[in-house]
Image: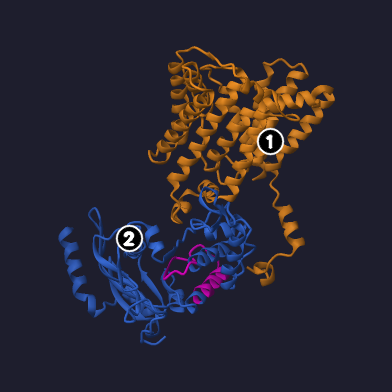
Amino acid sequence: MTNQTPAPVGGSGSAAVTDMLTVRGIKKTFGRVNALREASMSLPRGQVTAIVGDNGAGKSTLVKCIVGVHAPDEGEVLLDGERVHFTNPQQARDAGIETVFQDLALVEDLTVAENLFLGREPTRGAGPLRLLNRRRMRSEALDMVSALAINVPRVNARVRRLSGGQRQAVSLARAAGFSSKLIVLDEPTAALGVQETARVEELILDLKQRGVTILLISHNFEQVLRLSDQVQVMRAGRTVAQRRTSATDGQELVGLVTGAIIDPATAEAEVADAHEEETLA
Amino acid sequence: MTTTSAESTGAPTPERSRRLQLSEVSWPELASTIGLVVMAIVFAVLNPGYLSEGNVSAMLQASAILIVLTIGQTFVIATGGIDLSVASTMTLGAVVLGEFYAAGWNLWAAALAGFVAAAVVGVVNGLLISKGGITDFIVTLGTLSAASGLALIVADGQKNTIVEPVLIRMSVDGIWVFSWSVLIALALAVVAHVVLFHSRFGLHVLAIGGSEESSRAVGIRTWKVKTGVYLISGALAGVGALLLIARVGASEPAANTSFLLNSVAAVVLGGVSLFGGRATIVGPVVGALLLTALVNGLTRVGLSEFYQPLTVGIVVVLAAFITRYQK
């Protein structure tokens, strides 16, 4: 957890690319609302980056621009050094960006194995006679959940019977299981109890151990300090500060989020924003 | 989250998996089978001829069309939708078949024309619902009326008598108590079971019924699947049209309303959730058999046919009640 950026993991063409994801100058407005004034950040490969910010600071909008839910008005997104432009979440998924939503996108009436493979089920046979390869689904599902060393019940159990933490574990296993480059976690523990939160946090660290790059959105500063390597602060539609987690503390983060502390790098832009607000009012 | 790792991730021992499977038996899905057995015993006691080979064969024969329509309805309901147009679509298919036959077409070519007409109604239903964003109930209520109207127009209100030895053989010949019509219906049920539980399409049908939003989030093109289930329902109504003509010996623009109600009733009796997400093919097929056997039994014990719709209604509501109680 030093300030050095680690060497790139695995060869993906250009060895110079150390950041898994870079966003530059992303802007997004909805009608007259400036949801994102200007967002730029980099996610170092194999590290956990947390985005913190108040409600309405633009965290969700930024994430939605990255995972293809929204198309940004301006700016660019680079995944693994290549410029990408997603118009829907499926494209982002195909490119290796997996998202775990806080409302757990699982189908309760299906089994754990079916949920893990939903949308990319293995089949056997050919042409119109292709059938689901349920045996392979089950055995690979077992590998996926046991690789995470989590307490997931039988892969044949229906998700309806699982606890909130187990469901989130299934979502994480699904995100991690398909050689994804980047996993976006949107408030992964918001709906969970204390013990389950601890389990899910273990899972996230476990994913990091396996070299996955993670973008974490969380309201919980303690959690951010526990899990992340780098923190990105957002305020009023801007990315206003970036800190190494080891070089900051809760107090500074609160200050940056509320605006009590202004990072010199963005001070100018923020004064301009404030001026603009005044003229509008 | 306090379970041991052996219990959570290890392969279950044979005994454990058997025990768990037993505990996961869904009673609503079994209710129709239990109901059918109990009812058969009661009617057999009241009327010794009820379980005779001849009557069982007659009951199966009478249930063939309903089984075929019920399979289609099951796919639609499994996605959380409903197809109110099945019976009128079958009527339209039968009338189209009759008109082409009367115009001198070969029976099978005419049957294909009827099948295509019914399938087209299904696709229209599916596209209006999935792409047009109109509620399934309203769309299929509309096509219910439109298809019967078209049937009246095409047939000009007249019926066409169709006498073909092969159609008569479909109802008369067969294997043991199963006529060819029944065997066709059962073969379609087997295919439907494989599609529902062993194909990607089937899994997506159940996923959409469980949560359309989640299904879309994992990249399932939900509009295709939804159009698909209405197409299946329409196409099976087209098969039903041929069976109907084999049974009646003519194509007529009749309403056939009881087939609509009974197809939904059979699905409910089969323990399929009307909200979608959970379904079997066996359950609704047994439900269709139960409804047919019920009406047959009531007739044999001498109950006036006026009582039959009432009894069917009570049984269906009772079945829905059991399903609800289970939850």
State which quarter of the image contains the N terminus of chain B.
bottom right
* Residue closest to the eye, B200 or A91: B200
Q: Residues within 10 Å of mark 1 (few under 14, many from 20)?
A: many
Residue drawn 61% across and 36% down?
B267
Q: Residue A239, percent across and down?
A: 29, 71
Rendering colour (chain A): blue
Q: Residue A143, percent across and down?
A: 59, 69
* Residue closest to the eye, A191 or B281: B281
Q: Residue A208, percent across and down?
A: 47, 77
Q: Amino acid at mark 1?
A: Val
Q: Amino acid at mark 2?
A: Phe
Q: Is residue B171 left or right of residue A48?
A: right
Seen as rendered, the residue at the extreme left is A279
- In the picture of the structure, the residue carrying the numbered disc 2 is A86
Residue drawn 61% across and 37% down?
B188
Mark linked to residue B235: none
Q: CA distance from mark 2 to mark 1?
A: 48 Å
Q: Is residue B263 left or right of residue B116?
A: right
Rendering colour (chain B): orange
> Magenta span covers which residues?
A178-205
* Residue closest to the eye, B97 or A179: B97
For disc 1, the chain is B
Mark linked to residue B286: 1
Residue drawn 55% across and 47% down?
B202
Q: Is residue B276 above or below residue B145?
A: below
Which of the 4 quarters of the picture holds residue A97? bottom left
Q: Is residue B165 above or below residue A123?
A: above
